[in-house]
Image (tube, coloured by chain):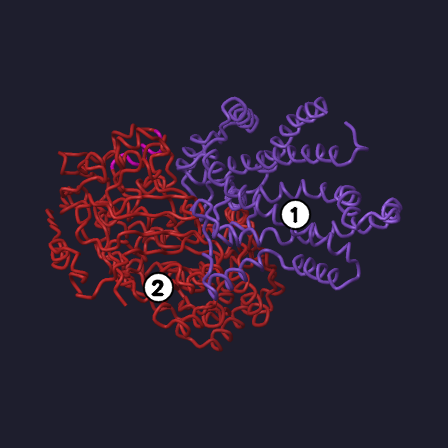
Chain colours: A red, B purple
Amino acid sequence: MHLKATLKLTAAALLIAGTAMAAGEHPVTGEKLSDNQTFTYRLLDQFPTLDPQLNEETAGSHVIRDLFEGLMIQDADGNLIPGVAESYEATNGNKTYTFKLRDAKWSNGDPVTAHDFVYAWQRAANPETASPYAWYVELTSMVNAAEIVAGEKDPSELGVKAIDDKTLEVQLTQPLPYFPAMTTYATLSPVHKATVEAHGAKWTDPENIVSNGAYTLTEMVLNEYHTREKNPMYWNADSVIIEKTTGLVINSETQALTRYKAGEFDHLEPLPAGQFPALKEELPDEATSVPRLCSYYYAFNLRPDAKPEIQDPKVRRALTLAIDRDVIVNQVLKGGQWPAYNFTHLKTAGFEMPEIDFAGMSQADRDAEAKKLMEESGVTDLDLKLIYNTSESHKQIATIVSQMWKQKLGVTTTLENMEWKTYLNIRRDGNFDVARSAWCADYNEASTFLDLLTTTHGSNDGKFSNAEYDELMAASKTSDNPNEMYTKAEQIIADESAIAPIYHYANTFLLSSDIKGWPYNNAENNWYSKDLYRVAE
Amino acid sequence: MLSFIIRRLAVAIPTLLILVVFSYLIMYAAPGGPFDAERTLPPEVMANLNAKYGLDQPLIVQMWNYVVNVVVHFDFGPSYLYKDQTVNDIINQGFPVTLTYGFWSFVVATIVGMTLGITAAVYHNSWLDYLAVGISIGAQVLPNFVMAPILVLVFTLWLGWLPGGGWQGGQWEYIIMPVIALSTSFMASIARLTRSSMLEVLNANYIRTARAKGLPMRRVIFRHALKPALLPVVSYLGPAFVAMITGSVVIDMYFSTGGIGIFFVNSALNRDYSVIMGITILTGALTILFNLVVDILYACIDPKIRY
């Protein structure tokens, strides 16, 4: 099969590229632009690193997206659009990808070449780099990735090579139709070899850093703030409107809200728990709730040596049915979250929700069935240990759920809260009956959730194991129609009551009404400063 | 005196070593490690991380290497959390911030606290006394995590006079609110201590004698009463000064000052071993140093004390 996917720039982007910004009007929308093109936002915590290959989790990813541009990037709706790559071609049944690179430059004027990508990707897999996200390189199925991470092969044997300065060829061990989408993630961003080698761990300091994204890092004070300013060397710099972006680290929720109201910054996320309705009323043009691809659930301990009562699917189903999710979503969280009856977030791209029987029932019917199931199982005097990490909203939910179980089923619950790392350790060791858990998507596809419940997944802390489920998920990897399999997998989770889903996340935030271009429809909440602009008021 | 100082500094070295050993052991006894996260890392990735940071070595070897690096190279190692930073970088950035707002808090707390305390004692049972006592009790019961949001609400949102947080290299408008929030409760303690000890001294026989001789009140207070009255206050000021300059997580959290306090707490929560150790040693060394300074001050104030 020979598939050629040449990517085109959108008409809008062409228009932007050809127009000067001096007119004070937005080149596409014609809105009058403010003279002040700065954007300031709040960070809950200091991100740990700006080194794309060392980055983990989501904390610093939005900064890295501004500073380093990968082969592909996302537009405001989350669609894949070309970044440094101009086009790509998939051959050999989606096992070979050839990317054609555009004429892009590093912030010091050097050209961005295919060799920069080869260097960065080898660096990510290299055991000496010790990247916590080295597994991401393994996930891409690049030839020899797993062996290199395990120290069995040399990084130079990774399945990626520069055919010439502008052509990058990637070899995969299995066909991955979504490989180009994986190149948007920080781990696969290019880095400037000479800079990394000259400055070691300090190469990301503002005085050393060389980047290829729309912005460069100009100031960095840990736990206080950082600034990034427009990169004149960026290939599409003419279309970039925001001149300077500042991230302020503000740990305290109350301080952040007060300072936002005082006009000190433009974007505040997340909002204090439960305050969204009041803020929406107070600041209707600024308060927003959008989906966030994370699912909140209670994991049952299904290890063979765990409490025998919860090995009975009837008991698990009774416990699941007895949770009134509407109370949790509407009276505790109040931020536009969705009650969940399945695992995968309902807004995940392409995901088709299965017909889960109890999703359509009234809570009274669920409660009646739960009581009946509990009687059938013959379990009495059940006492469960429910663990959660210390947090006000986890505590509220745990308290409510334990009351529901007590009142409806006569099940008593011992709540145990602990600080994060202790909780992770105890959950991993299986020292619980029920554990508060949550999972956030790494990419916008259902397998990012559903893989977690396969037998060998490192974060399957409830140790759910089902052969049919494992087969489905393995087959989905190379299937042309994986969504059908995901729906079936969800059905197994529901039939077995593998977990008790509770809610699907929403992201609540405040954004100044003069900042435009925010990607409200990007389900992964991936934003780029280059897409934003401030209109004159 | 000199031999006393040398002796005290000599004792400081084994004290710090014991501190290092105990902190190391307690730190390792805490469940979880620096690289535990929601996502369990595959074993080969975890092995690479442990190898890079030397965590695959036996504990005793790790401790030995650590002490050698600190003593010989004055290198506290890389941070496990902030991967682009070393512990030296973090302390270099955070400690001057903490030192600045801690120092000014100390100055404000001491001057205001002593003034309030002396006024209250001298005008005992008058309205001035009640006012001073009222202020110090009010300041004492208002913890800084309550005061910080109130300050920002009033001075930033309502009045618009001061920025709500940040440090910006220590410009004065960024220092005011942290100093008020940090100094208040210390100020209250100093005021109460000064007042009670001053009252005690003012009732002493030699003060009565001085007044009976016809000395003016001001001279009685500043010449005869103040020095002995300040002894208990000085012994409080030493630890208070260390507490203020070694960082307040509340101040750093609420005012985004980027001081050492927030790093200390975050490092403990994240099991960022090298940062925990670095700041522990810094705090320990400062505590030892300022206890010594207090002892020397004692000798200057109280002629009965000789070392």
Which sits in the foreground, B269 or A144?
B269
Where is residue A347, by image quadrant? bottom left
Which sits in the foreground, A399 or B120?
B120
- Where residue A403 appears, as percent x and y from the top left, is 58, 68
Find out whether residue A301 is within the magenta segment: no
Density class for disc 1 (Cα within 10 Å; few <14, some 14-19, many ≥20) is: many
**Secondary element type, mark 2:** strand
Q: Which residues are magenta?
A: A143-151
Give the amino acid type for the residue marked by disc 1 in the picture. Thr
The residue wearing badge 1 is B110
- Where residue A295 appears, as percent x and y from the top left, is 40, 59
Give the amino acid type for the residue marked by disc 2 in the picture. Leu
Which sits in the foreground, A20 or B122?
B122
Find out whether residue A147 is within the magenta segment: yes
Residues beneath discs 1 and 2 located on the same chain: no
Q: Residue at x 25, y 62 (%)?
A: A34
- Where residue A255 appears, as percent x and y from the top left, is 48, 59
Residue A409: tell me if it is visible.
yes
Query: Chain under label 2?
Result: A
**Secondary element type, mark 1:** helix
Where is residue A142, by image quadrant? top left
Q: Is residue A344 above or below residue B83?
A: below
Q: Which mark is residue A511?
A: 2
Q: Which mark is residue A94?
A: none
Q: Residue at x 52, y 24 (%)?
A: B65
**Relative to B296, B91 lies left or right:** left
- Where residue B240 appears, as percent x and y from the top left, is 65, 44
Residue A425: tell me if it is visible.
no
